[in-house]
Image (cartoon, rainbow, N blue to C red):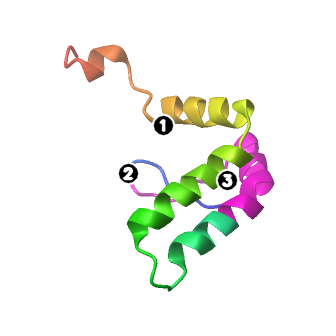
Amino acid sequence: MHYSVADGEPATGSAPRFLTKWFTRCRPILAVAAQRIYRNDGEPLTDKLPAVFRLLFRQMNMLDVLALWALGLLTDYRPWSCRLGMD
């Protein structure tokens, strides 16, 4: 797994352990979802996306949802004063 920091420089070291474990555990279902989206057939993307989201929601448990929520919070971590322009 590779990622970069905000200034575009490659991060030193590896991804956080919890993130690596989560992607390793979810790799099979994410692969199926990607195959369904990128498959070259006559089905429009507007029909593919709802089916893929249903598949993902059936396979994920509440801990996965909480982990994604926490990851979302961590990726946008800034002091509230910066968000409100009160530096």
Residue 71 in percent (x, y) is at 57, 35
Q: Which residue is mark 2?
A: 7
In the image, the segment drawn in magenta is: 8-31
Q: Is residue 13 covered in magenta?
A: yes
Q: Indicate the quadrant where residue 84 lies.
A: top left
Q: Which residue is mark 1?
A: 75
Question: Which of marks 3 and 2 precedes in the sequence?
Answer: 2
Question: Which of marks 3 and 1 precedes in the sequence?
Answer: 3
For the point 45% across and 84% down, the residue is: 42
Magenta stretch, overall SS: helix
Q: Which quadrant: the N terminus?
A: bottom right
Q: Is residue 61 covered in magenta?
A: no
Q: Mark 1 is on which residue type?
A: Thr
Q: Mark 3 is on which residue type?
A: Gly
Q: Is residue 16 left or right of residue 5?
A: right
Residue 15 in percent (x, y) is at 67, 50
Residue sitting nearer the eye, 46 or 60: 46
